[in-house]
Image (cartoon, rainbow, N blue to C red):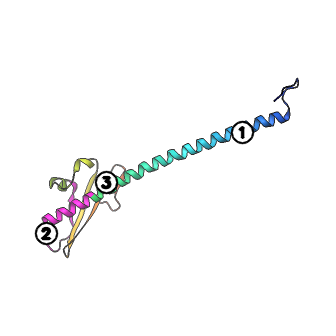
Amino acid sequence: MKLNKNGWGLSQMLWMSGIILFFFLVVVVLIYNLYNSLDLDMNSKESVDRLSYEQMEEDLEEAATKYMEYNYSNFSDTGDIWLTKDQLFKAGLFMEYLYEDCEAYTISNKINGNISSKAYIKCEDYVTSGYDN
């Protein structure tokens, strides 16, 4: 760009405005992508927490099934049996210290020799659907 005694001309001003606009658009796109990636990180943390709660439910159901096998092996049918995480911990079937901040129980039954267990947990930021106080 060549300056004369009259200052910049219209063409030089349009070129400089275009370059500044281009850099501005690049910065906006980079900030937008950064914001979206941070949002995804927050969502992935939530999904990891949800997976750990689902794992706790599976652990409780497995412990309750073992409890039923040990204590109700002579029965062909039972009604619904409520087992708390404390009961399963005392029986040595569940590691309570892993989930100290959560309340949990299972509803287990044995019908025609088949044991089924469903776990329910209530934590600070997660509650199993159907949880009953």
Q: Decide: is 57 above or below 100.
A: below
Q: Residue furthest top?
A: 5
Residue in view at x 27 percent, y 52 percent: 103
- Magenta stretch encompasses residue 80: yes
Foreground mark, 2 or 3, reads 2
- Residue bounds of the magenta highlight: 59-85
Residue in view at x 59 percent, y 44 percent: 32
Q: Quadrant of residue 19?
A: top right
Amino acid type shown at disc 1: Leu
Which badge, 1 or 3, comes first in the chain's sequence?
1
Q: Decide: is 117 above or below 2.
A: below
Query: Which element is circle 3 on?
Result: strand
Amino acid type shown at disc 2: Ser
- Residue tagged 1: 21
**Residues under labels 2 and 1: Cα distance?**
77 Å
**Residues under labels 2 and 3: Cα distance?**
30 Å
Residue in view at x 82 percent, y 33 percent: 12
Looking at the rendered structure, the number of numbered marks drawn on it comes to 3
